[in-house]
Structures are given as structure tokens and as C-alpha cells.
Amino acid sequence: MKVPNFRLIKDYKEFQKNKPLGVVGGPIDEQNLNEWEVTIPGPEESPFEGGNFKVKICLPEDFPNSPPQCCFLTKVFHPNINFKTGSICVNFLKKTSFFFDKMNNKKTWTNRTTICDVIVGLYALLKFPNQDDPLNSNARDLFVRDKERYEQLAKSFTNKFAKIN
């Protein structure tokens, strides 16, 4: 028999109570709290405003000691998100050594991070791309060289893939 992950249950209850940013969704099956699908609204005053972005969150058995695997199921044009696979490159979802964290002064995964924190972090990533750690080099190059064109393309992709009719 599988031992319940009490921290995961606590995070689920917090999510149900607070629904950060008006996010909808949750566990795909309430009998398995390790696989989630949530829909994150596009941040206001960003090229993603008005869009709804579906994200899959897979929590490992040893959560919160290891970070979840997250990917956008909705296509998005963003420097830190792979357009084809939806994979995400962001430090707060990376587990690294203590030495590396201190040496590079980067915020990486900590076991104090909750599922709500992950969702808020993904929302913030949409609004504030990290140009230093790109996964989509085309989006990153446009973001750096021609921010206006980047925003036009991101809005176009939002309208095409993230609008609910």
C-alpha cells in the first residue's frame, strides 16, 4: 500500500482554498495527487494577456524533496518555453547542489516551495522572461533585439493557441 504524502495533501488543500491567480484545474484524478493540469491566465500588461495557458504538473514521489516536472500544454512563444514540447527552463524548478546555488546566487528548488508557489512562479515567468537562460533562442533573440516584434509575435501566438472561444 502506498504511503500518503502528507505534504502533497496539505498543498492540495491550500490550492483548493486559495486558487492562486484564479487558476482552474488541479489533480487529473483525486486518487492520484501527483499529476495535475491547471490553466493559468495570461498576465495583464503582457503579450499573454487574455490567454489561458494549460500546464501539466507532475509531482515526483519524493515531493517536496524534488521539484515537479512542468510543461505547457498550450503552445506559447516565450524565451524560456520550448514551443514544440512545452518544456520550461526556469531556475526555481531545478534541483542543484548547495555549492552551485551559493556560487551562482540562483534561486533553485527548495522543499519549502508549494504547488501554489510553482503556479505563481510560472505566471511570473510569462510576464518576466529570463533572457539569460533561454530554451527558445528565437524568442530570446527577438526579446533582446526587438522587444516590440517579440511582443507582437507572442500576442499572435496567444490569440491563436490560448484563447477560449
Image (spheres, helix red, strand yellow):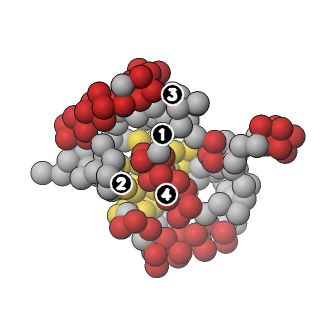
Pointer 1 and pointer 2: residues touching (CB < 8 Å)?
Answer: no
- Could you say where residue 131 lies in the image, as x and y percent from the top left? 53, 32
Q: Amino acid at mark 4?
A: Ile
- Does residue 143 lie above or below 59 as drawn? above
- Could you say where residue 121 lies in the image, as x and y percent from the top left? 52, 54
Query: Circle 4 — which element?
Result: helix
Q: Nearer the viewer, mark 1 or mark 3?
A: 1
Give 116 or 10, whichever is nearer the viewer.
116
- Does residue 53 lie above or below 140 as drawn? below
The residue shown at (72%, 59%) is 111
Q: What residue did someone put label 4 on?
A: 119
Q: What residue did someone put label 1 on?
A: 129
Give 39 or 8, whichever is nearer the viewer.
39
Q: Which image quarter is the N terminus in?
A: bottom right
Crowd class of label 2 (few under 14; some 14 to 19; many from 20; radius 10 Å): some
Is any part of residue 56 visible from this angle? no
Q: What residue did someone put label 3 on?
A: 135
In primary-sequence order, the first of circles 1 and 3 is 1
Query: Circle 3 — which element?
Result: loop
* Residue 43 - label: 2
How far apart are the alpha carbons under marks 4 and 3? Answer: 19 Å
Give 30 or 58, whichever is nearer the viewer.
58
